[in-house]
Amino acid sequence: MKRVKITVGGRVQGVGFRWWVSRHAEHLALAGYVENLPDGRVEAVAQGPADDVDRFVTLLTEPDSATGRPGYVRSHHVLHETPVAMPRRFGVR
């Protein structure tokens, strides 16, 4: 089990980025959430099997998306956290 907090900056608000993140997290069966931050960045917390979390991080942070990711990611920060008990679903805040 692995848990990460990913913060991405760039053109990621108002373009469907959170919806796209949520759909991919659900496809990977990850728990967590994605939300807009007041400073224009987006934050996602994801928890699940390590390989799936690693794939999720790649999807969110790759400079050019081959998966039709909306917007444009210019910067990112990944923080590894200790897994915690949480609902097995992914939400948009």
Image (cartoon, rainbow, N blue to C red):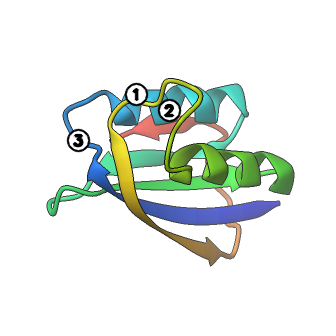
Question: Which three-letter amino acid code belongs to the residue tagged 2?
Answer: Ser
Q: Is residue 51 above or below residue 69?
A: below
Question: Which three-letter amino acid code belongs to the residue tagged 1?
Answer: Trp
Name the element at disc 3.
loop
Q: Nearer the viewer, residue 83 or 37?
A: 37
Instruction: Please name the residue that numbered disc 3 is placed on.
Output: 13
Tell me if 60 is positioned left or right of 80 in this view.
Answer: left
Instruction: Please name the residue that numbered disc 1 is placed on.
Output: 19
For disc 3, the neighbor class at 10 Å (few under 14, some 14 to 19, many from 20) is some
Position in image of residue 1 (x %, y %): 83, 60
For disc 2, the neighbor class at 10 Å (few under 14, some 14 to 19, many from 20) is many
Residue at horizontal 74%, vertical 54%?
54
Extreme residue in the left direction: 38
Position in image of residue 57 (x %, y %): 63, 53
Number of numbered markers: 3
Question: Given contact means CB atoms under 8 Å apart, are the residues at marks 2 and 1 in contact?
Answer: yes
